[in-house]
Amino acid sequence: MPNPTAAMLVIGDEILSGRTRDSNMHYLAQELTKIGVSLTEVRMVVDDTDAIVDAVNALRAQYDTVVTSGGIGPTHDDITADAIAQAFGAHIDIRDDARALLAAHYERQGSEFNAARQRMARIPDGATLIDNPVSIAPGFTMENVHVMAGVPSVFQAMVASVLPHITGGAPLLSQSLRINRGEGDIAGPLGDLAAAFPDLSIGSYPFVRDGVFGANIVIRGTDAGQVDAAMTRLAGLFPGDCA
Amino acid sequence: MPNPTAAMLVIGDEILSGRTRDSNMHYLAQELTKIGVSLTEVRMVVDDTDAIVDAVNALRAQYDTVVTSGGIGPTHDDITADAIAQAFGAHIDIRDDARALLAAHYERQGSEFNAARQRMARIPDGATLIDNPVSIAPGFTMENVHVMAGVPSVFQAMVASVLPHITGGAPLLSQSLRINRGEGDIAGPLGDLAAAFPDLSIGSYPFVRDGVFGANIVIRGTDAGQVDAAMTRLAGLFPGDCA
């Protein structure tokens, strides 16, 4: 049985303008891989309602799980919650449960629970809240779509809250070998190896380091015996050039 | 007139599994922003022909320019060139011009120009080659789609080859200010500022640093006078909390 699939939607002008380097995608990819969920597609869009609606509707129809990051804060450019509501055709307003969480938090802090902060309690009808131990303002889950913050520390805390509720698959085992030969030398024997182990995924990831060409060969699969057997055969192909 | 738009398609299992952290997207975003092209959408897909074909066809119809990275090497998992040909309904085979470049290179190196390396001369009919000063194997341009390697040093060299041929727009000017206050305090006055300068893009990018909440406010626009005026007004809003 193939593993469950997931997609991610990264929302934010700051990523696409090159101002900020996204790190949430890489983090999520690693966390999903650990539990046997295949992150199969990622989209990154600007802060534009139509772009968010179109992307989330395309992804939630195609993949088992969708995770979004960004755009759920209190400022005028935070439009994700309303866009998600629109994508689902759901009503959205300040919801009592989210409001209560935030009101208590700002009272403890001695900060004013002003209109901007109340915006963070806008949650679509039918969604369940995602816990945010870092800064309280919750994310939310709408069917198979998990809506999370973009600030990495908050995103990671929300992933931790949600992961136990995502159905995983067989853990993907992975072994890799660095070969200090150009891919052109490796490709023929590697193709034969891939053909001999059709249930494994064998990838070649080239690099140039100090002017030397090489490749990291990664063998992935759910059967430990097969991964071991393929790796043993790979190591025998270029015995003098492995690291 | 709005600036020209671009999209990027990142191809590769290694990115989506979390094994490799993509850096090409961030690089391209910065280069495009410099010449006034708006990178508006990014998609990342696994090494799967249908996924590549669907994504490239969706993106090339919607944006002025599309850049792809990854999957044009000599190994069995390098399927991008054939997928691009399929997306355009174009014939693909080893092409004489690309073959000649590679044959000369491997002769100089004293390496065998074997079947795997000849695969890198597979170029769709109608495409023009993109120069690769790093490792010779060319990328190619098919209408508005620029197909480039995934290895960052090669990708960057190919971007440098192609950028002069991409029509730019008005350079986007950007100024930013760090405010050491939570977004909830900033949001109200910032929303008023955004409303007062409808031609500018004003973004708020929150952070948590050493337990302190703050936000970087970025003001972007093509009119230097407006950007200056908005920034002056912003700096006056929270005089004690700016850095």
Image (tube, coloured by chain):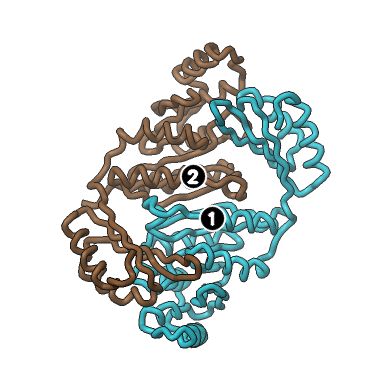
Chain colours: A brown, B cyan
Question: Quick check: can you spot residue A158?
Answer: yes
Numbered badge on residue A137: none
Separation of marks 1 and 2 at Cα, in angstroms: 12 Å
Residue located at (55% from left, 62% from top): B66
Q: Is B17 situated left or right of A123 in this image?
A: left
Residue B65, image x, y percentages: 59, 63
Q: Tell me if label 1 and label 2 are in contact, CB under 8 Å.
A: no
**Badge 2 sits on which subunit?**
A
Q: Residues within 10 Å of mark 2 (few under 14, many from 20)?
A: some
Question: Quick check: can you spot residue B187?
Answer: no
Q: The N terminus of chain B lies in which quarter of the figure?
A: bottom right
Q: The C terminus of chain B lies in which quarter of the figure?
A: top right
Residue A51, image x, y percentages: 54, 46
Q: How many tags in the picture?
A: 2
Residue A174 sits in which quadrant?
A: bottom left
Q: Which residue is mark 1?
A: B25
* Residue situated in front as seen by the camera: B73 or B10: B73
Would you place residue B1 above or below residue A182 in this image? above
- Residue type (three-letter) at the residue carrying disc 1: Met
Residue A3, image x, y percentages: 26, 49
Numbered badge on residue A23: 2
**Badge 1 sits on which subunit?**
B
Residue A230, image x, y percentages: 22, 64
- Residue type (three-letter) at the residue carrying disc 2: Ser
* Residue farthest along the right direction in this orientation: B225
Would you place residue A135 above or below residue B200 in this image? above
Residue located at (47% from left, 42% from top): A24
Residue located at (69% from left, 41% from top): B201
Q: Is A28 situated left or right of A151 in this image?
A: left
* Residue farthest along the left direction in this orientation: A225
Mark 1, secondary structure of its residue: helix
Residue located at (64% from left, 58% from top): B31
